[in-house]
Protein backbone atom coordinates (compact mmCIF):
# COMPACT_ATOMS: atom_id res chain seq x y z
CA UNK A 1 0.00 0.00 0.00
CA UNK A 2 2.80 2.42 0.69
CA UNK A 3 4.39 1.42 -2.64
CA UNK A 4 1.19 2.51 -4.39
CA UNK A 5 1.21 5.83 -2.53
CA UNK A 6 4.84 6.39 -3.45
CA UNK A 7 4.02 5.71 -7.10
CA UNK A 8 1.11 8.13 -7.07
CA UNK A 9 3.22 10.80 -5.38
CA UNK A 10 5.97 10.26 -7.95
CA UNK A 11 3.55 10.76 -10.82
CA UNK A 12 2.19 13.92 -9.18
CA UNK A 13 5.74 15.23 -8.81
CA UNK A 14 6.46 14.52 -12.46
CA UNK A 15 3.33 16.39 -13.49
CA UNK A 16 4.17 19.39 -11.32
CA UNK A 17 7.77 19.32 -12.53
CA UNK A 18 6.70 19.37 -16.21
CA UNK A 19 4.16 22.13 -15.58
CA UNK A 20 6.85 24.28 -13.98
CA UNK A 21 9.09 23.90 -17.03
CA UNK A 22 6.22 24.73 -19.38
CA UNK A 23 5.39 27.96 -17.56
CA UNK A 24 9.07 28.96 -17.46
CA UNK A 25 9.35 28.68 -21.23
CA UNK A 26 6.17 30.70 -21.64
CA UNK A 27 7.73 33.49 -19.55
CA UNK A 28 10.97 33.35 -21.50
CA UNK A 29 9.02 33.78 -24.73
CA UNK A 30 7.37 36.95 -23.38
CA UNK A 31 10.76 38.32 -22.26
CA UNK A 32 12.25 37.63 -25.68
CA UNK A 33 9.33 39.43 -27.36
CA UNK A 34 9.69 42.43 -25.02
CA UNK A 35 13.46 42.44 -25.60
CA UNK A 36 12.91 42.39 -29.37
CA UNK A 37 10.43 45.28 -29.07
CA UNK A 38 12.96 47.27 -27.05
CA UNK A 39 15.60 46.62 -29.69
CA UNK A 40 13.21 47.67 -32.48
CA UNK A 41 12.17 50.85 -30.69
CA UNK A 42 15.82 51.68 -29.97
CA UNK A 43 16.48 51.41 -33.71
CA UNK A 44 13.42 53.62 -34.33
CA UNK A 45 14.76 56.19 -31.85
CA UNK A 46 18.12 56.26 -33.62
CA UNK A 47 16.37 56.60 -36.99
CA UNK A 48 14.16 59.42 -35.71
CA UNK A 49 17.22 61.31 -34.48
CA UNK A 50 18.29 61.83 -38.11
CA UNK A 51 14.98 63.47 -39.09
CA UNK A 52 14.38 67.20 -38.53
CA UNK A 53 10.68 67.22 -37.70
CA UNK A 54 10.78 71.00 -37.32
CA UNK A 55 11.23 71.20 -41.11
CA UNK A 56 8.17 69.06 -41.98
CA UNK A 57 4.99 71.10 -42.43
CA UNK A 58 2.59 68.57 -40.90
CA UNK A 59 4.62 68.34 -37.69
CA UNK A 60 5.10 72.12 -37.54
CA UNK A 61 1.33 72.62 -37.87
CA UNK A 62 0.43 69.89 -35.34
CA UNK A 63 2.95 70.87 -32.67
CA UNK A 64 2.39 74.62 -33.05
CA UNK A 65 -1.18 73.93 -31.88
CA UNK A 66 0.22 72.97 -28.47
CA UNK A 67 2.97 75.62 -28.44
CA UNK A 68 5.89 73.40 -29.41
CA UNK A 69 8.18 74.58 -32.17
CA UNK A 70 11.72 74.20 -33.45
CA UNK A 71 13.96 71.51 -32.01
CA UNK A 72 11.43 70.86 -29.24
CA UNK A 73 9.35 68.89 -31.77
CA UNK A 74 12.17 66.36 -32.08
CA UNK A 75 12.52 66.27 -28.30
CA UNK A 76 8.83 65.55 -27.77
CA UNK A 77 8.84 62.75 -30.35
CA UNK A 78 12.02 61.23 -28.89
CA UNK A 79 10.68 61.42 -25.33
CA UNK A 80 7.43 59.78 -26.45
CA UNK A 81 9.30 56.77 -27.86
CA UNK A 82 11.51 56.66 -24.74
CA UNK A 83 8.43 56.73 -22.49
CA UNK A 84 6.99 53.73 -24.31
CA UNK A 85 10.27 51.84 -23.84
CA UNK A 86 10.39 52.73 -20.12
CA UNK A 87 6.84 51.42 -19.70
CA UNK A 88 7.81 48.11 -21.32
CA UNK A 89 10.84 47.72 -19.05
CA UNK A 90 8.87 48.65 -15.94
CA UNK A 91 5.90 46.46 -16.69
CA UNK A 92 7.68 43.26 -17.65
CA UNK A 93 11.31 43.29 -16.52
CA UNK A 94 10.57 45.03 -13.21
CA UNK A 95 7.31 43.05 -12.82
CA UNK A 96 5.27 46.18 -12.08
CA UNK A 97 2.25 44.95 -14.05
CA UNK A 98 1.57 42.44 -11.27
CA UNK A 99 1.89 44.85 -8.33
CA UNK A 100 -0.86 46.03 -6.03
CA UNK A 101 -2.14 49.58 -5.50
CA UNK A 102 0.45 50.29 -2.81
CA UNK A 103 3.08 50.38 -5.57
CA UNK A 104 0.95 52.05 -8.25
CA UNK A 105 0.03 55.11 -6.17
CA UNK A 106 3.62 56.37 -5.82
CA UNK A 107 4.25 55.49 -9.47
CA UNK A 108 1.26 57.57 -10.56
CA UNK A 109 2.54 60.48 -8.45
CA UNK A 110 5.94 60.08 -10.10
CA UNK A 111 4.33 59.99 -13.55
CA UNK A 112 2.48 63.26 -12.92
CA UNK A 113 5.62 64.86 -11.45
CA UNK A 114 7.72 63.87 -14.48
CA UNK A 115 4.98 65.09 -16.82
CA UNK A 116 4.99 68.44 -15.01
CA UNK A 117 8.77 68.66 -15.37
CA UNK A 118 8.53 67.94 -19.11
CA UNK A 119 5.84 70.60 -19.46
CA UNK A 120 8.01 73.11 -17.58
CA UNK A 121 10.87 72.31 -19.96
CA UNK A 122 8.61 72.88 -22.97
CA UNK A 123 7.29 76.12 -21.46
CA UNK A 124 10.82 77.41 -20.86
CA UNK A 125 11.83 76.41 -24.37
CA UNK A 126 8.81 77.99 -26.07
CA UNK A 127 8.82 81.22 -24.00
CA UNK A 128 12.40 81.95 -22.81
CA UNK A 129 13.26 84.70 -20.35
CA UNK A 130 14.51 87.82 -22.20
CA UNK A 131 18.21 88.40 -21.67
CA UNK A 132 18.96 84.74 -20.94
CA UNK A 133 21.41 82.65 -22.92
CA UNK A 134 18.57 80.91 -24.80
CA UNK A 135 16.76 84.09 -25.78
CA UNK A 136 16.90 84.55 -29.57
CA UNK A 137 14.68 87.62 -30.17
Image (tube, helix red, strand yellow):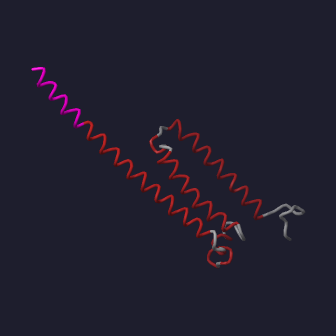
Left/right of residue 41 with respect to residue 11 in the rendered view:
right
Residue closest to the eye, 114 or 66: 114
Q: Check the image and name the residue furthest to the front.
A: 3
Quadrant housing the C terminus: bottom right
Residue 55 in sight here: yes
Residue drawn at x 19%, y 28% is: 9
Q: Position of residue 117 (x, y in %)?
A: 70, 52
Placement of the N terminus among the 4 image quadrants: top left
| Residue at 38% across, 52% down | 29
Residue 94, given in percent of the width and then of the height, sits at: 50, 44
Inspect this view and state whether residue 67 appears: no
* Horizontal side of residue 136 vs 81, given as left or right: right
In the rendered structure, the answer to whether residue 83 lies left or right of residue 32 reads right
Residue that protrudes farthest toward the top in the picture: 2
Q: Percent from the top left, x then y, of residue 131?
A: 90, 63
Rendered location of residue 115, percent (x, y)? 65, 52
* Magenta stretch bounds: 1-15
Is residue 98 shown in magenta? no
Which residue corresponds to the image point at 86% horizontal and 62% vertical from the top-left?
133
Quarter holding residue 12: top left
Horizontal arrangement in the rendering, residue 5 relative to residue 108 (left or right): left
Compared with residue 41, is residue 94 higher up or lower down, i.e. above or below? above
- Reply above or below: 113 against 83: above
Measured along the vertical axis of the image, is residue 79 above or below residue 27? Answer: below
Magenta segment's dominant SS is helix
The residue nearer to you, when weighing 5 against 87, is 5
Question: In the image, is residue 46 above or below residue 22?
Answer: below
Please tell me which residue is depicted at 66% across the width and 47% down the height of the picture.
Answer: 113
Residue 5, quarter of the rendered image:
top left
Amino acid sequence: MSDHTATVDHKADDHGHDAAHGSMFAHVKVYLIIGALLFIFTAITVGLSYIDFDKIAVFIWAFNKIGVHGAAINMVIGLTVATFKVCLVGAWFMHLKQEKAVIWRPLLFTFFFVTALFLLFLLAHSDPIPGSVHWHH
